[in-house]
Amino acid sequence: MNEFERLMDAYDLAHSEPETPLLAELNHEANMRLLHGRMVSGHLQGRLLSAISHMIRPKRILELGTYVGYSALCLAEGLAEGGRLVTIDRDDEIEDMARDYIGRSPLAARIDFRVGDALKLLPAIEGPFELVFIDADKREYQAYYDLVFDKVPSGGFILADNTLWDGKVLAPLQRGDRQTAALLAFNDFVAADSRVEKFILPLRDGITIIRKK
Ligand SMILES: C[S@@+](CC[C@H](N)C(=O)[O-])C[C@H]1O[C@@H](n2cnc3c(N)ncnc32)[C@H](O)[C@@H]1O
């Protein structure tokens, strides 16, 4: 991030809704304590996820890639009355931290956190989900998309995070970089998929907003 981008980011955050104290604590702890703390959606993207969820008012949300629960807590803010969010992560090493923060939220009872491989769990999870957030292994985005597509009703949304991958989608592909290769293929597939309307929002690492026709 250059100086202009840093100042713009700070200005943006200063004029956006603040994080709740719980989200601020989670964001801080993840960044201080965890090796990959930067994977947390964070303040600005978290408010975007909350806003999108509030606009849709989904009865059910599906998230692939819980990590420490930050984005799950943001997305759950917009659930319709009685709605529920299912979130999946295969990393049992961060399970306790995620359960701790989710458990401290007033939304805890509405969040169903499952530990396991999304590719294995998804076939048995019944839809519909009006909102799906894909944020797990970049090499598996196409597989997640294919597995969730029929669980999303017409008019429902799929969000895919990190689709600009720190600008690597524009750089010459490095040999062995399977994550970038998979994201390039996924972005091309979604762009050509006539079943959906889509656009990539260049916020943070890029987030593709996909609406099923
Ligand atoms: C970028 S982090 C998620 C960040 C979180 N959504 C947020 O914004 O705060 C990606 C997570 O996906 C999980 N993951 C990767 N592949 C997975 C798979 N096949 N099934 C379930 N979880 C997976 C990783 O363990 C990691 O915790």
Image: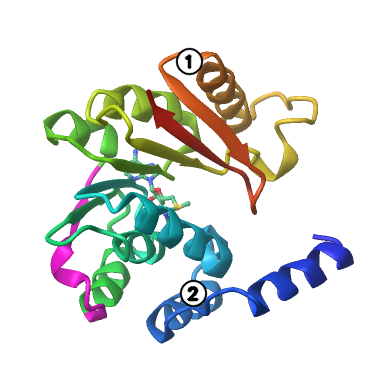
Could you say where residue 34 lies in the image, as x and y percent from the top left? 49, 69
Q: Residue at x 49, y 65 (%)?
A: 47
Q: Is residue 93 above or below residue 135?
A: below
Q: Which quadrant, please, contains the N terminus? A: bottom right
The boundaries of the magenta stretch are 104-116
Query: Which label was assigned to residue 179?
Result: none
Left of 20 or right of it: where is 83?
left
Amino acid carrying mark 2 in the image: Asn
Q: What residue is shown with label 2?
A: 27
Left of 144 or right of it: where is 129?
left
Depth check, front residue: 96 or 166: 166
109 magenta-colored: yes
Measured Cα–Cα span from mark 1 to mark 2:
35 Å
Q: Residue at x 27, y 40 (%)?
A: 130
Q: Is residue 110 above or below residue 88?
A: below
Could you say where residue 211 lies in the image, as x and y percent from the top left? 42, 32
Task: Specify whether tag 2 is near ligand 1 (CB below 8 Å).
Answer: no
- Determine if residue 140 is in view: no
Query: Which label was assigned to residue 193?
Result: 1
Q: Quadrant of residue 22?
A: bottom left
